[in-house]
Amino acid sequence: MDKKNTAIGVLLLVAAMLAFYFSAKFSPPPPKPAIPSAPVTSPVATNAAPAAGPATSPADTTLTASKTPSSAPAEYVTLANDFVTVRFTTAGGAIDRVELKKHKAELGHDAPYLMNAPQAAPALSFGTFPGVDKDARYELVSHDAHTVVYRTMVDGKLEVTRRYELLGGGAGDPYQVRHETTFRNLGAQPLPLPRTSLNLGTASPLGPLDTGMYVNAGYYNGDSTEFIRRDELAGGGFFTSSPPLPFLDKVAPITWAAVKNQFFAAILTPDEPGVGLRIERVKINPLAPAEDRNAYAVTGELLVDLKPIPANGSAKWSATYYAGPKEYRRLARTDNFKQSEDKVMNFAPFFFNKIFLSQFFGPLLLTLLTWVHAWIPSWGWAIVVMTILLKVVTLPFTLAASRSAKRMQKLMPLIQESREKYKDNPQKAQEAMMRIYKENKVNPLGGCIPILITMPLFIGFFAVLQGAAELRYAPFLWAVDLSAPDTVYSFGAVTLPLLGLTHLNINILPVLMGATMIYQMKLTPTAPNVDPAQATMMKIMPWMFALFCYNFASALALYSTVNALFSIGQQMFINKMPEPELAGATGPDGLKNVTPKKKK
């Protein structure tokens, strides 16, 4: 394969890396929602707090519970299985936090990872519903091994009962909690209920070295997903200096809503769709300066319309809540997740992912990787085998591109001769060049199209390795965590944000990756009449690529290194392929090229 075609592949990868980094680091915030001049019925549309009055008419509310927070201390009970311990609180009759028993908070420590800790509010607590929200103190009605029930009264008119059941076994996924809130009208008159919201939980960065790139909130409307990154509310940007947004509202039918970080997600799936989602950036480290973006998390509120209750009647609102790892094989099980909750994986977070169909190839490749891991217990070796399989599958396309490149290389003297002869007549020069291509059955795009065909697989696999929860704290050789850089020594904190570096470390795999890419480039034969600027760019490109990828996770560096090693062997084989015979090679005057072959 000549350097021109190699350049196309490398440039596409570098463009993907740059787009991935800069779109997350410097993307400008979204415009503030416009405030309509005319009155609206939806509080979300005004970018204001949800109304406390009934959904039918906010002025007709008959509930007058005090908005003063209760001073009574919260009390807690827990439900547990082999996977989670869910702690419930009397504050709002909701979920205080979830301990994930199978996932450690820190490498080398036994403490479990905590979801919704720290928090903006208890998960599933009501918002802007006086007497019912997180400031209210519920009474614990019952508590057994699988269920917990809370109850509160509002103005002597409304009884609210909240029931939770921890699922698992044959009754759902062990990370799921089934919830049901019952509103009972104690009066002799119909009782309208307010439009309110339920908290989804709080998603935080995974640690001090987590930049929060993957911390976001999103929803599925039954057709497509939308995710809003935490930093989209942070203000500023590469070309702007706008202030932070206090919150961002999305008006849409909500099949499910979620808050998540790189490896864990909280997903609320209501039985009846919600009507909107509020995303808020919240500070979880009060001691950090306001400009420190890593001191912030993201929380979400699912907006719901509660139905009016007839006299002495009742109404129910129910949902399923998932708090656990982003494991595709788990979330794709339709017996437990019936509303496409697996889309929370978000394999195509950026535009270039969508171009290369990562939303399609990502799930397929992660399924194959999981299958390989079932046979090979090490996730590192599973990545190695998976990378080799991808290279073998795409080998016919690579060889086709190589053959086309060799034919193009052999035709370059004739093409250059045509350009020189018709340098004053571009139309004839083009006609002569196309005649050369046609007579020799060469497609000028033949070296590019096969490479472009393989790109979705490699970019899709790259997207898979960025968010697979299975890789967190998975060791391989000297790397103690495949989801983090394989640092063997650190010189301490530095400030190189343009390169995505916060610490000056010695990482082995990126160095190996860069070395293999440089060697591969040296093996690639130089095309005749190559432009000196292009040749220089080809020499610099592997160094730039290794630099920008230096602080990537070990899994990504391992994948890139194995990919480059295979490519080296592939290039050695290509270089030994016989030169193509072009019997129809003719010059611009229709004469055959009779240049004698070089003696060996």
Image (tube, rainbow, N blue to C red):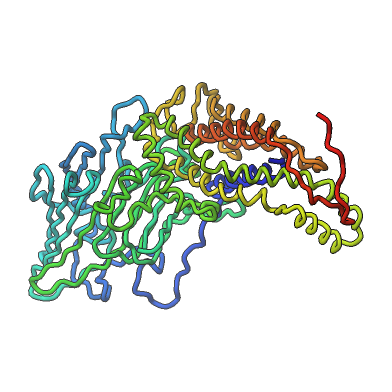
Q: Is residue 5 left or right of residue 434?
A: left
Q: Is residue 95 above or below residue 250?
A: above
Residue 286, visible in the rendered structure: no
Q: Position of residue 331 (x, y in %)?
A: 31, 49
Q: Camera-side residue: 402 or 6?
A: 402
Q: Is residue 14 above or below residue 130?
A: above
Q: Is residue 227 left or right of residue 512?
A: left
Quadrant of residue 568 in the image? top right
Q: Is residue 448 left or right of residue 311?
A: right
Question: Number of callouts in the render?
Answer: 0
The residue under the point 22% across, 44% down is 174
Q: Is residue 161 above or below residue 499?
A: below
Image quadrant in which the N terminus is located: top right
The residue under the point 42% across, 45% down is 296
Q: Position of residue 217 (x, y in %)?
A: 39, 53
The residue under the point 71% across, 37% down is 578
Q: Camera-side residue: 113 or 288?
A: 113
Q: Position of residue 166 (x, y in %)?
A: 18, 46
Q: Camera-side residue: 469 or 412?
A: 412
Spot the residue most to the front.
583
